[in-house]
Amino acid sequence: MSEFWRSKRVVVTGGAGFLGRYVVQRLEERGARGVFVPRSRDYDLRQLSAIQRMYDDARPDMVIHLASQVGGIGANREHPAEFFYNNLVMGVQLMEVGRQRELQKFVAIGTICAYPKITPVPFSEADLWNGYPEETNAPYGLAKKMLLVQSQAYREQYGFNSIFLLPTNLYGPRDNFDPRSSHVIPALIRKCLEARDRQDDQITIWGDGSPTRDFLYVADAAEGILLAAEHYNSSDPVNLGSGQEITIRDLAHLIAELTDFRGQMIFDTSKPNGQPRRLLDVSRAQQLFGFRAKASFHEGLTATVNWYSQERLQA
């Protein structure tokens, strides 16, 4: 329980989503009594009037902005304009109205997709502007990156307290397993389980399997966000990651083992790989607000597979 949160009225946009549910749960565990989760059916956060009404209704001291339109490589390729516009307009207007309402703090959640396509590994926050993002997710990554520009500009001109966090690829129970929009871990888990149950002798995976990723368990990400919200007060960007790297090929074999899929894996090299490597330098988060990922990748992946397996059985 934290006295810091007991007196705070907190809006969590996207609080009913994958990461948002974990953030709301952690807030409640800390004793927060005024958590408000705006639902899209009630507040279309792309509309300025809806944002203003949300501020009127919730009267927040802090906004944790998690809401976004997000997806894997396929979804980014199919909807680049939507991913750019919807994410940009939500964040920019939420922060601007917060500034007008003298909000105590705005916590902006960016994305690892904001980093340049070719970045020295591990990714340091100092390299964030040293190139253009990977093409398939650049519109999404740049839209989110503008929140960093806005945060820094608003702090300089208005003294507005906002922070900008860069989480790596998240995974865990309650992730999105829709094959049209899911990220790589839930997509592979679903493919392997369905192929196993159909007794298929192979599955197809996008790319050649060589790209690497840094995956962060969703409960750890929620903890990192709340530690930053409570203790960090600067507009310098901060990475949130596990500090561990795995290739997509090795990931696929690990998921096949955990799901008991024994067929062949066909890597479709006609499909894009995405960014060649992703691994975050996580030292700044540890130094500034004491965050370090706790869940091992094997533990987190096992929990995710078990959760989705149970969901399939119940369905």
Image (cartoon, helix red, strand yellow):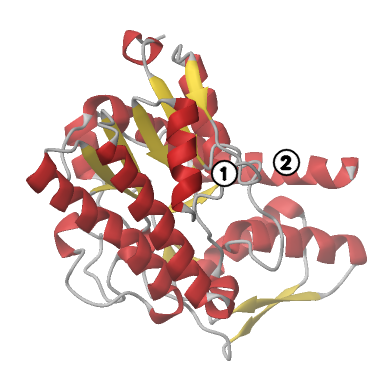
Residue 33 in the image: above or below residue 227? above
Residue 47 in the image: above or below residue 54? below
72 or 35, nearer to the observer: 35
Residue 145 in the image: above or below residue 266? above
Residue 280, horizontal then vertical, whole percent = 30, 55
Q: Type of residue at label 2?
A: Asn
Q: Residue 43: which numbered mark, if any?
A: 1
67 or 44, nearer to the observer: 44
The residue wearing badge 2 is 306
Q: Residue at x 64, y 39 (%)?
A: 303
Q: Residue at x 56, y 39 (%)?
A: 299
Residue 279, horizontal then vertical, whole percent = 33, 59
Helix, strand or loop at label 1? It is: loop
Q: Type of residue at label 1?
A: Tyr
Helix, strand or loop at label 2? It is: helix
Please tell me in which quadrant of the rendered image residue 66 appears: top left
Q: Residue at x 49, y 23 (%)?
A: 35
Q: Residue at x 39, y 26 (%)?
A: 60
